[in-house]
Image: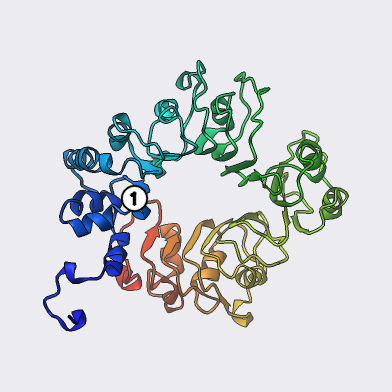
Amino acid sequence: MNILNNTNINILDLPDEILRTIFNKLNMVDILYSLVDVNQRFDRLALDSLYIHHLDLVIKRDDIHNSSVDTHIIERICSKILPRINDKVTKFILEPLSVKRVLGTIHYPQLYSLSFVNFQPKILSQHLLVSKYLSDLTYRQKSSEKYITILPSNISYTHCLSSTLTKLTINVNTFYDYLYLLNGCLQSLSTSIIRISKINRSSSMIDNTKKLVKLKCFSLITDYGAHVIMTNNSKTYICTYIDGNQLFDKVLNYMPRLNKFIFSINTYIINDDIGIDRPSNDDDIRNSFTERGIQSFDICFDDKFMNNRGNCHVYSLPYQFNEFLYMSNCFQGGRFDTVRLLSMIDKRPFEHKLFQIISQDFHFLRQLIMRNDIPQKNEQHHSCTLITFNHLLTLDILSVHNDYVIQFLSDKITRLPCLTNLIIEYETLTRMTNYFTNDTTRLNCAKIKSLATFELLVPLEHFYSYFPSL
């Protein structure tokens, strides 16, 4: 039969390869609930061991959903399907609705990886005990509750939480939440990936003398400075508030097997008459690294304090991180093909030349966040080279001087062919677009699908014609 020439095509007429492609586009829950037990062919394809070894049982919901229907779906999957494939499942992604039913009555002898999505922290210790064979745990929160707080009352230390857990991925509120979790409980842990909301001082007393002797890979990321440390006996990634000498004395000196070091270090200095001994120039900072044998790196250094504040960014080359944070106007350029997010902040002006350098050196940049209320000094935009950000999707200019709004929205200065998300004050936007009649800023606004102003938006005349994609 020539399927392409048949106007009455039945889905069962399609070859297995096409059906597998269709299945791969569908949600796992929908496949198990709707297609299993329809016929033997669907069962063979849907329950193939290569397909169902990793089960994502998170239900994709619309804004309006029926919890009773969700419960019925999970009940059918747990009672009719999971008992048939329990010996094939190696990984689960679960949410609160499904976790008790999925893990409570069925044994999964091959299960080694669990990902918990949108759970409260009090249940964490319970599910670390779910399988004596468990080796990989991921614990994620929904975006509105990105980080969790772990208190001593949440964790029972009577027994080791998991004697077999080797990999833990988790978002927590503070570093001390993480220390509570690691307080001698995860004896087999070899890989730990953690994102922390903030690192600060705490009066909590934690016995941190216990060692994780099997830990080989450690990743630490925090939103305040994007700190990262990763080690696996041969590689280390680090981004934290620390200078070259401290870095060696406090960290590298304790890693004699280390043969590769990849880092991005942001140091923000606040000198309010507290006697900080600040390096006098970037040579002092460069020497603190080169004297320790670190050669391939670059530095962006504020040689003068502004309002008693200063910033220094030291990073290894080639740059291997996907974020470049807190760029100031001292940036001189480089190659940053891995960077997708760039944040800029300063109390000195960002001139047109700097943006030209960025457009060339951050070729695949997708998100730009800027904070600067200081006007530009060199405003000869019309005589400058046209700047193009070919891949920029999101532009956050919520708290900037008007000069930077013109710098980016005027197509005579900058071209943003892919811009779809704009964050800006509404009053500034109306003023800079001349109440949505200015043709020089029209082109860069034409494809915007998301406009965030964080204030009551009353669309004026010409608003929707100015933003036809909204």
As drawn, the residue found furthest toward the left would be 8
As drawn, the residue found furthest toward the top would be 158
Residue 358, compared with residue 75, is above or below; it is: below
**Residue 361 makes an appearance in the image:** yes
| Colour scheme shown | rainbow
Residue 114, compared with residue 314, is above or below; it is: above
Residue 132 percent coordinates (x, y): 45, 29
Image quadrant containing the N terminus: bottom left
* Element on which disc 1 rests: helix
Toward which corner of the image does residue 371 lie, by quadrant? bottom right
Q: Is residue 464 left or right of residue 127?
A: left
Q: Which residue is mark 1?
A: 52
Kindly identify the amino acid type of the residue bearing the numbered disc 1. Ile
Residue 35 percent coordinates (x, y): 20, 54
Toward which corner of the image does residue 78 lie, by quadrant? top left
Residue 233 percent coordinates (x, y): 70, 44
Q: Is residue 403 left or right of residue 285?
A: left
Toward which corner of the image does residue 212 lie, by quadrant? top right
Image quadrant containing the C terminus: bottom left
Q: Nearer the viewer, residue 224 or 277?
A: 224
**Residue 62 makes an appearance in the image:** no
Q: Give the residue drawn at x 36%, y 36%.
A: 108
As drawn, the residue found furthest toward the bottom would be 5
